[in-house]
């Protein structure tokens, strides 16, 4: 199963890429559209700064394209090949899928992007939990 310490955990749940202890996002629900991309400045457990440099997350646009294509292919396979719909209906289902899942796609892209540059750090987790338990 997916558990803390796996890269997939941080990607799917938007957890801090270094300690997996908390969400990077201010609002957990991506469908609250005003806060879809609102992120905390740093992790309150391990103090990792999420925006490593100015405009860091612009790079996630490339990832967003790939994730969108994956969602579109999935929608096409489900409607055209499994439900044997017409090509027009398959096209409409792709458009609807991309609109409905847009907040999820944007967050997944950011999570994948930041996880390309940071990895889970056991030492850091141990150190930061020690600091928390002392105070
Ligand atoms: Zn952290």
Image (tube, helix red, strand yellow):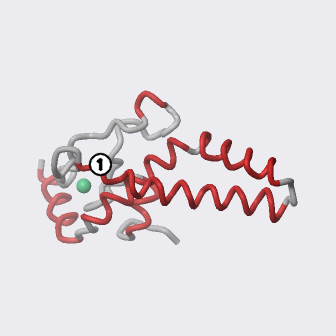
Q: How many labels does the image show?
A: 1
Q: Where is residue 76 in the image (x, y as percent from the top left)?
A: 72, 58
Residue at label 1?
A: 57
Q: Is 82 positioned to the left or the right of 18 in the image?
A: right
Q: Which residue occupies 31% across, 40% down?
A: 39
Q: Is 11 positioned to the left or the right of 117 in the image?
A: right
Q: Which residue occupies 39% across, 70% down?
A: 6
Q: Where is residue 45 in the image (x, y as percent from the top left)?
A: 21, 51
Q: Position of residue 2 (x, y in %)?
A: 49, 68
Q: Does the residue labelled 1 lie within 8 Å of ligand 1?
A: no
Q: Residue furthest front?
A: 88
Q: Assess disc 1: are there few (<14), some (14-19) or many (≥20) residues with their C-alpha within 10 Å of its C-alpha.
A: some
Which of the four quarters of the rendered structure image does ligand 1 lie in? bottom left
Question: Which residue is more in the foreground, 55 or 1?
Answer: 55
Q: In which quarter of the image is residue 38?
A: top left
Q: Is 97 positioned to the left or the right of 61 in the image?
A: right
Question: Which residue is more in the foreground, 10 or 123?
Answer: 10
Q: Which residue occupies 81% across, 54% down?
A: 87
Q: Is 64 positioned to the left or the right of 102 in the image?
A: left
Q: Is residue 23 above or below residue 129?
A: above
Q: Position of residue 105 (x, y in %)?
A: 50, 49
In terms of secondary structure, where does tag 1 sit?
A: helix
Q: Which residue occupies 53% across, 43% down?
A: 102
């Amino acid at each position: 199963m997916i558990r803390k310490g796996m890269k997939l955990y941080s990607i799917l749940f938007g957890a801090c890429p270094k300690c997996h202890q908390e969400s990077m996002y201010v609002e957990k629900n991506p469908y609250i559209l005003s806060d879809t991309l609102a992120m905390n400045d740093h992790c309150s457990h391990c103090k990792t700064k999420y925006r490593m440099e100015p405009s860091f997350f612009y790079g996630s646009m490339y990832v967003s394209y790939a994730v969108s294509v994956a969602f579109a292919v999935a929608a096409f396979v489900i409607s055209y090949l499994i439900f044997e719909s017409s090509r027009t209906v398959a096209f409409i289902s792709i458009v609807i899928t991309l609109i409905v899942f847009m907040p999820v796609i944007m967050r997944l892209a950011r999570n994948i992007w930041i996880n390309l540059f940071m990895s889970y750090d056991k030492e850091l987790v141990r150190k930061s939990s020690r600091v928390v338990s002392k105070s």
